[in-house]
Image (cartoon, rainbow, N blue to C red):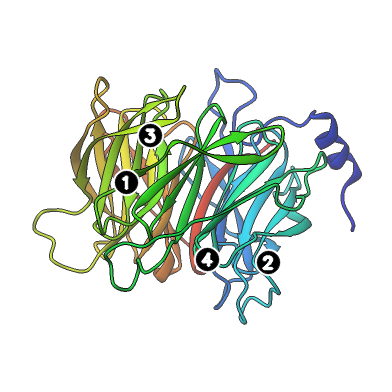
Amino acid sequence: MNINRQILAAIVVGSVAPLVYAADAQETPRNLRVYAGTYTGGASEGIYVLDFDAQTGRLGHPQLAAKTGNPSFLALHPAKPLLYAVGEATRESGEKWDSVTAFLVEPETGALTQLNRASSRGGGPCHVAVAPAGRHVAVANYGSGSIAALPIREDGPLGEASAFVQHTGSSIHPQRQREAHAHSVTFDPAGRFLFAADLGTDQIMVYRFNDMLGTLEANDPPSVHLAPGAGPRHFAFHPSGKFAYVINELDCTITAFTYDPAAGRLDPIHSVTTVPGDFTGDNTTAEIKVHPSGRFVYGSNRGHDSIAVFTIDAGSGALTPAGWTSTQGKTPRNFNMDPEGRFLIAANQESDTLAVFRIDPASGALEPTGQTVAVPSPVCVVFSQSPAQ
């Protein structure tokens, strides 16, 4: 394996600055990178990297960062030049098993070197998250309805799973909820609990996470139930740690919760629709993000092809609809914001584009910048800091 030895040594001693955050917190970084995960059954070859100017919102031309099969969700290490990607094995992808792949990030170019691949321990891996301490990753397997935790070795590769949980159950949707379908894994800010949104059972499963051993144990209570047929998909915490939000794919709602970080307990506040009242077409939701300021929540609609904006009540965590913005394309599978919350990039899966929007800091409203960049079948967007400041 041909790996830059200086970069590898930097990982071991921890001398490389974090990828996600600016070295000088008082100055907004100008140069960022955007990684786009894709489906590779068509024109895509894997993970693409694009330069991004965080002050002007200018998105550069995509370059292939790594050739790999179906990297449909990506996660960056919080402190080292490492990226992790799920890989769903299909005939088109050429992969032999469902996996999570570890990549080393080349600091100057953003190119990715594969370190290793580890089994996801289930079928159809769709989501991956790195624990806050950076010692483990968690993966959700949609197809088999299971989750797993895998250790990150000192130099970045993944070990075999240290924990595995098979979900069971069903709900009312005749096609989508016949069995469990784990759709996301999210660590709480302290890294003490792991939350797994299961679309098939209408539950958010809660696990106590041992960061040293990488083990998972059912919390008490072990789950929170959503409305029958809701189909919870992705989950996000408020920056304060007091609230959390889940976007429900099937009934097109967002459910808000209060959060007790000591007990790992979620208590529902209310649910709000993600589509306008006069919309009558078919729709499913996809991604949810909380603005870094803690003032706004965003959710994507596939069918209505929009980003829904909500304001957050600072005292209660409740949501109020604040409008909808077209994503300038079809099927916004995913979106993300730069670390300062100035811009949002939407990944339009079926129109093969990334679209850039400016965020109004007062209202949270999205304004199209007019930029759309061609990327084949984009399904995930993550920001990282470029060292060239």
Q: Identify the element where label 1 is drawn.
A: strand
- The numbered disc on residue 110 is none
Say which of marks 1 and 2 sits in front: 1
**Along the line of sight, which residue is nearer the eye, 265 or 294?**
265
Say which of marks 1 and 3 sits in front: 1
Q: How many angstroms separate mark 4 from mark 2 (CA)?
A: 22 Å
* Image marks 1 and 3: residues in contact by CB distance under 8 Å: no
**Along the line of sight, which residue is nearer the eye, 60 or 233?**
233
> Is residue 226 among the parts visible in the rendering?
yes
**Along the line of sight, which residue is nearer the eye, 354 or 202?**
202
Q: Earlier in the sequence, mark 1 or mark 2?
A: 2
Q: Earlier in the sequence, mark 4 or mark 1?
A: 4
> Is residue 343 among the parts visible in the rendering?
no
Amino acid carrying label 1: it is His
**Residue at label 3?**
291
Q: Earlier in the sequence, mark 2 or mark 3?
A: 2
**Residue at label 1?**
225
- The numbered disc on residue 68 is 2
